[in-house]
Image (cartoon, rainbow, N blue to C red):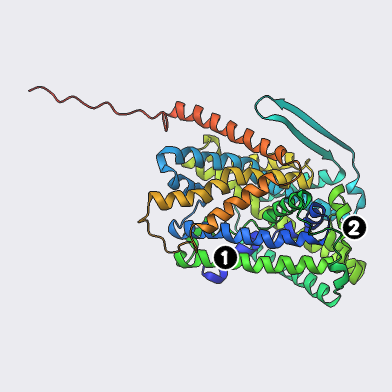
Amino acid sequence: MGLGSATALNMIDMIGVGPFITMPLMIGAMGGPQAMLGWVVGALFAMCDGLVWAELGAAMPGSGGSYKYLREIYGREKLGRLISFLFIWQLSFSAPLSIATGCIGLAGYAAYYWPGLETTIASHTASLHIPWAGNLQISWILTPGTSVAIAVCFLTVLLLYRHITVIGRLSKLLWFGVMGTIGWIIFAGLTHFNAARAFDFPPGAFTMSHQFWTGLGGAMLIATYDYWGYYNVCFLGDEIKDPGRNIPRALLLSILLVACLYIVMNLCILAVVPWRELVQSGQNNNGLYVVSLFMQRIYGTWAARLVTALVMWAAFASIFSLMLGYSRVPYAAARDGNYFRAFAKVHPVHRFPYVSLLALGVVAAAFCFLRLKDAIAALVVIRIIVQFLVQALGLILLRFREPDMPRPFRMWLYPVPALIAAAGFVFVLVNRQNAGREIRYAVVILLTGILIYIIRAWRHRVWPFERTPTPQRAAVP
């Protein structure tokens, strides 16, 4: 793939269902249109972290992405073996969470056709006190929409339980469908733009209070979720023409283009749908089909029904693509000897990693019982702690360890973007409501992964339990 194809593919991965379902959550986090700051600041942090990926992707082009980078940065047969294992271990949780958010979002838009899908049948919050971690809480909710989300998850597994040859055509249809939907939203918003409604800020919206910073942290967490995907071109380094030049360009260009689309699209929606309605939807986890309401206000029911179908198609195609890609990652690590052996099994007829696919589908279906905002928060926090933060700081370490390593692309203003990215991740982790809850999840996953690695390393006699060969004594003549 050249620059154009790589950029388009990256944009497909970035723009899934996220921007269509998260706007009420963004507005609810900051309590008004000032939530647009979350998109802007989130884009700046995405660009800083994108420079980290750009340097690593250009220096080490090939398949694997973070798995390969983390192992090389921290020592292929030393600490890097543990950290790369932890990356795959957290992916066993974050990948199903990512898929589940798409399934929940699709069910949320289906509720525009069938409002009864949002009726709460049961909900519960369980709490477990862990001496060294505090209270570990998990909330679940059961609605008819939950059944729809689970059904979509298993339908995707069923469709993928075969030799896949149509993913390229599906990606193209997804790109045209999503871009066409966003273009329609922007056109409708610009031609019906109400500036007074778009900039109807509540009193004290920009007062630098604790509430403001907490709200900004929550908004940036949602923006981080929506921007993620800018790094996916790094997982396809083997298929990129002139990767030393095109990986950084495709990565940074896709961030810039998607940021512009997100900001303009959301501003257009705020100019039509009053933000106070969105706050209520975000807090209640109902009525998240904001794009449907937007089109209904402008063109009527027919347009709302059409755009709802388009968003549901985009969500399903995104789920399909995510499950296909993620199911191959544990398989590759298992083939590399750095993950559970069962995940290396392939179907005897169709030759695909069926164990990895089935495990991913089952865990994703279980996560469909979570509320959307809880699933997004858990996903983002787990990945920040176990992947993104370690990788951003790892780039600086790699510069010290291997200063002469060929680097076709060098980070601009090094090391400032890497430090800004790391600071932004820490800000998102701690400056928001109920921040400790997801951090406890991540810590438990991290410590459990370390324990599992130590047991496996001891059994297989790899770092740090590898045997040192005993030197042979020279024979006495």
Is residue 280 toward the left or the right of residue 21 in the image? right
Q: Residue at x 73, y 44 (%)?
A: 375
> Which residue occupies the foreground of this view, 145 or 263?
263
Q: What secondary structure is marked by label 1?
A: helix
Q: How far apart are marks 1 and 2 (CA)?
A: 35 Å
Q: Name the residue under label 2.
A: 277
Q: Mark 1 points at which residue?
A: 252
Q: Residue at x 84, y 60 (%)?
A: 290
Is 126 above or below relative to 205?
A: above
> Which residue occupies the foreground of this view, 470 or 272?
272
Residue 241 point in image, percent of width and height = 47, 67
Q: Neighbour class for label 2 at 10 Å: few (<14), some, many (≥20)?
A: some
Residue 49 point in image, percent of width and height = 57, 57
Which disc is residue 225 wearing? none
Residue 348 seen from this side: no
Amino acid carrying label 2: it is Glu
